[in-house]
Image: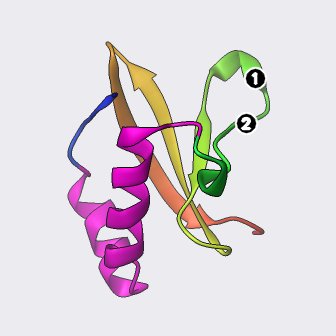
Amino acid sequence: MPTIKPLRPDLNKYLKRHGLEKKFGKQLKLFQESPSHPSLNTELLEPKKLRIYSFRIDRKYRAIFIYRNGEVEVIDINLHYK
């Protein structure tokens, strides 16, 4: 089970502004239990050498994250098809 750092204030605002707080909480809990759960669609983004990953919040939004010092840090939340 990975440890997840608390979200930065700007990311919390983004979730609130787009009505994603509940969905994000649900997906984050699922991610903590099983980072490779099929409904998360967790993937390593290109270019792969940067080691930046994403998981699905819903069909439209993704959480972008990195592993740092044994912790997961969500570095962005954005539209998936932008």
Residue 36 in percent (x, y) is at 59, 37
Spot occupied by residue 80 in the image (x, y as percentages of width and height):
70, 65
Residue shown at 79% from the left, 33% from the top: 46
Q: Residue type at mark 2?
A: Leu
| The N terminus lies in quadrant | top left
In the figure, residue 23 lies in which quadrant? bottom left
Quarter placement of the C terminus: bottom right
Q: Residue at x 34, y 28 (%)?
A: 2
The label number, if any, that marks residue 48 in the structure image: 1
Q: Which residues are magenta?
A: 7-36
Q: Are marks 1 and 2 in contact (CB under 8 Å)?
A: yes
Q: Which class describes the residues within 10 Å of circle 1: few (<14), some (14-19), or many (20+)? A: few
Three-letter code for the amino acid on which mark 1 is drawn: Lys
> Vertical placement of 72 versus 28: above or below?
above
Disc 2, SS: loop
- Residue beneath label 2, please? 45
Q: Residue at x 60, y 45 (%)?
A: 54
Most frequent secondary structure within the magenta stretch = helix
Relative to 13, residue 64 above or below? above
Q: Is residue 51 left or right of residue 46?
A: left
**How would you rate the neighbour count of disc 2 (Cα within 10 Å): few for under 14, some for 14-19, many for 20 or more?**
some
Residue at 25% across / 52% down in the picture?
8
